[in-house]
Structures are given as structure tokens and as C-alpha cells.
Image (spheres, rainbow, N blue to C red):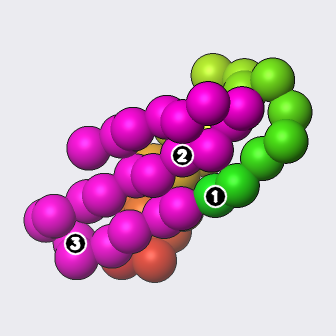
């Protein structure tokens, strides 16, 4: 699951791996954060 916030914040939850990735940002929020969060989850498993 992925949820973006205003200003680029985000939360990515992977229930199947019990992993949560959260980030803060002051930028305009690019769309690559979700794919980066997925890569992080895949690298820790």
C-alpha cells in the first residue's frame, strides 16, 4: 500500500513482509518515491 502526502511525504506498507517505509520531503513530490520504496522493501527480504 502506498499513500502520498502534501509536499512529497509518503508511506509505503508491505503487509506480506511486515515492512514500512516512510519519508518526509519539502520538495514538490516526484512520482519515483513509490518505486524507490518498493526497491527498499525488496532489498531487505
The Cα–Cα distance between marks 2 and 3, rounded to whole angstroms, is: 18 Å
Residue 27 at x, y = what percent? 86, 33
Question: Mark 2 or mark 3: which comes first in sequence?
Answer: 2
| Residue 43 appears in view | yes
Residue 3 at x, y = what percent? 39, 38
In the picture of the structure, the residue carrying the numbered disc 2 is 10
In the picture of the structure, the residue carrying the numbered disc 1 is 23
Residue name at image x 22 percent, y 72 percent: 17
The Cα–Cα distance between marks 3 and 1, rounded to whole angstroms, is: 18 Å
In the picture of the structure, the residue carrying the numbered disc 3 is 17
Q: Nearer the viewer, residue 18 or 11?
A: 11
Q: Is residue 38 magenta?
A: no
Label 2: which secondary element? strand
Q: Farthest residue in the right direction? A: 27
Label 1: which secondary element? strand
- The answer to whether residue 13 is left or right of residue 33 is left
Residue range (magenta): 1-22
Q: Nearer the viewer, mark 3 or mark 1?
A: 1
Question: Mark 2 or mark 1: which comes first in sequence?
Answer: 2
Residue 2's place in the image compared with 31, above or below, is below
Residue 4's place in the image compared with 30, above or below, is below
Q: Farthest residue in the left direction? A: 16
Residue name at image x 40 percent, y 52 percent: 12
Residue name at image x 36 percent, y 40 percent: 2
Whether tag 2 and tag 1 are in contact, CB under 8 A, the answer is yes
Disc tally is: 3
Residue 30's place in the image compared with 43, above or below, is above
Label 3: which secondary element? loop
Pointer 3 local density, CA inside 10 Å: few below 14, some 14–19, many at least 20: few
- The answer to whether residue 18 is left or right of residue 32 is left
Residue 37 at x, y = what percent? 53, 51
Amino acid at each position: 500500500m502506498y499513500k502520498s502526502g502534501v509536499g512529497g511525504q509518503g508511506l509505503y506498507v508491505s503487509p506480506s513482509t511486515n515492512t514500512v517505509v516512510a519519508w518526509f520531503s519539502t520538495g514538490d513530490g516526484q512520482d519515483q518515491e513509490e518505486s524507490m520504496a518498493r526497491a527498499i522493501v525488496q532489498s531487505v527480504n
